[in-house]
Image (cartoon, helix red, strand yellow):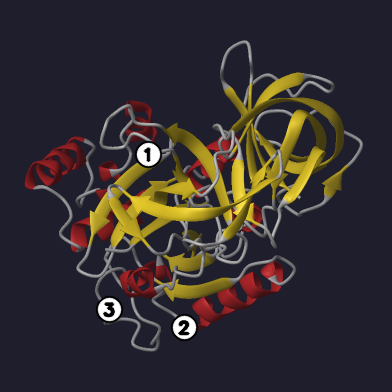
């Protein structure tokens, strides 16, 4: 069954956790003991109704404050699809958490309070979704019950959002008016909004086409592990295991192995112990080549006629995730696909004001939750595509070598 990963974003109290709770509740994806626990907690808090947000706000501080702090992952399925939800926080100081939850998402649900319309947080989260190249955006106009389910309010917010986002590279976005509290247009159609014919939120999630979200033009296979069994049955077997990060591979394809540039031909493709005739993203497979070549983890197998960029000098848009500011000329460990290198921060070009998208050039100290354009130099060449072309081969992670903490995530420009 097809898997859809999606994330939620929005201003504080826009109803993200309530929406996810409603999705789980109305799609019958909650166990009885979970529901009973939420009912008891709701009564203890003095709520007049079952507070479905408590299904996702798992930290004690989250329940006490009624906000989301950490990224909460939830899983559910319908007969048509499986889903992984990342409930991300709306506060400015947790921008890094939103980036974490959105980095692998096929879709993002951006909530807008119908009473407040498009806010700075809406702009911030839309920009981050655009920066992370999330293929599909679903803009949910929530709390329609508080504006008497007025079609005019919905249309006004939609026009403002379209005007704001027209300069962003967003491939696909659609609007759904909902009331997460009462369940209108979440899983079941709303009796109060017969004027909307676009289907419920669950309908949209079940039918978003995600088979084209992966790059199937540029063949990229980062090697994770060399399989060399010591057994009589597989005496001469040498396979290269990894995940297809782009393109389509077939037995007989002529390939080049980077960084050395040796050429060979794919002898076979194995999935478990089964030989298959085609491998495409995001399949994890083992490739056998016709020639014995010295290949190890961190190398990349590509098609002869479609090579990635190869360089040590790279420009990235980075989201800084550590309380310690970025150090200019500082050295960090860097992970790119399966390749581990070290890098030097050469220059900060500008920071981005995510509220209005202005470039900040007079303050180049990159602090936690800042997004900036920087130049780095790596100790060994990377084989990459731009992040806009391939989210897998265009992403990097920076790590503090002393503490082993992830300090930044970057999108190669």
Q: Residue at x 79, y 19 (%)?
A: 330
Report the front residue among 199 and 214. 214
Report the front residue among 3 and 147. 3
Q: Nearer the viewer, mark 1 or mark 3?
A: 3
Identify whether 334 is placed above or below 175: above
Secondary structure under badge 3? loop
Q: Which residue is mark 2?
A: 151
Evaluate whether residue 3 shows in this view.
yes
Q: Along the polypeptide, which appears first: circle 2 or circle 1? A: 1
- Along the horizontal axis of the image, is 207 left or right of 382? left
Report the front residue among 93 and 72. 72
Q: Along the polypeptide, which appears first: circle 1 or circle 3? A: 1
Q: Which residue is mark 3?
A: 189
Secondary structure under badge 1? loop
Mark 1 Cα-neighbour bin, 10 Å: few <14, some 14–19, many ≥20: some
Q: Residue at x 80, y 33 (%)?
A: 376
């Amino acid at each position: 069954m097809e898997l859809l990963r999606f994330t939620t974003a929005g201003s504080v109290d826009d109803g993200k956790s309530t929406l996810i709770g409603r999705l789980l509740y109305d799609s019958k994806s909650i166990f009885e003991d979970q529901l009973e626990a939420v009912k008891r907690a709701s009564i203890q808090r003095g709520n007049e109704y079952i507070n479905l947000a408590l299904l996702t706000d798992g930290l004690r501080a989250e329940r006490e404050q009624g906000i989301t702090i950490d990224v909460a992952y939830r899983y559910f399925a319908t007969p048509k699809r499986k889903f992984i939800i990342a409930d991300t926080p709306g506060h400015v100081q947790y921008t890094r958490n939103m980036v974490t939850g959105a980095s692998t998402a096929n879709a993002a649900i951006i909530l807008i309070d119908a009473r407040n319309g498009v806010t700075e947080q809406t702009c911030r989260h839309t920009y981050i979704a655009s920066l992370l190249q999330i293929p599909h955006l679903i803009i949910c106009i929530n709390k329609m019950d508080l504006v008497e389910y007025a079609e005019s309010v919905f249309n006004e917010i939609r026009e403002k959002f379209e005007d704001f986002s027209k300069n962003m590279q967003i491939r696909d976005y659609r609007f759904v008016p909902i009331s997460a509290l009462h369940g209108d247009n979440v899983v079941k159609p709303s009796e109060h909004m017969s004027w909307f014919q676009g289907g419920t939120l669950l309908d949209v999630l079940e039918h978003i086409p995600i088979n084209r979200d992966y790059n199937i033009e540029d063949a990229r296979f980062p090697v994770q592990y060399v399989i060399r069994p010591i057994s009589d049955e597989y005496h001469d077997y040498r396979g290269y295991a990894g995940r297809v990060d782009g393109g389509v591979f077939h037995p007989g394809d002529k390939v080049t192995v980077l960084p050395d540039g040796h050429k060979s031909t794919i002898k076979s493709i194995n999935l478990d112990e089964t030989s298959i005739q085609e491998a495409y993203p995001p399949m994890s497979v083992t490739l056998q080549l016709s020639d014995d070549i010295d290949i190890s983890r961190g190398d990349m197998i590509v098609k002869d006629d479609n090579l990635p960029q190869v360089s040590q000098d790279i420009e990235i848009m980075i989201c800084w995730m550590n309380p310690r500011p970025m150090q200019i000329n500082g050295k960090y460990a860097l992970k790119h696909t399966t390749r581990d290198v070290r890098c030097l921060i050469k220059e900060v070009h500008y920071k981005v004001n995510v509220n209005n998208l202005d470039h900040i050039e007079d303050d180049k100290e990159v602090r936690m939750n800042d997004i900036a354009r920087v130049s780095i130099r790596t100790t060994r060449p990377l084989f990459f595509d731009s992040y806009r072309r391939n989210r897998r081969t265009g992403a990097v992670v920076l790590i503090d070598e002393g503490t082993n903490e992830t300090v930044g995530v970057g999108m190669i420009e």
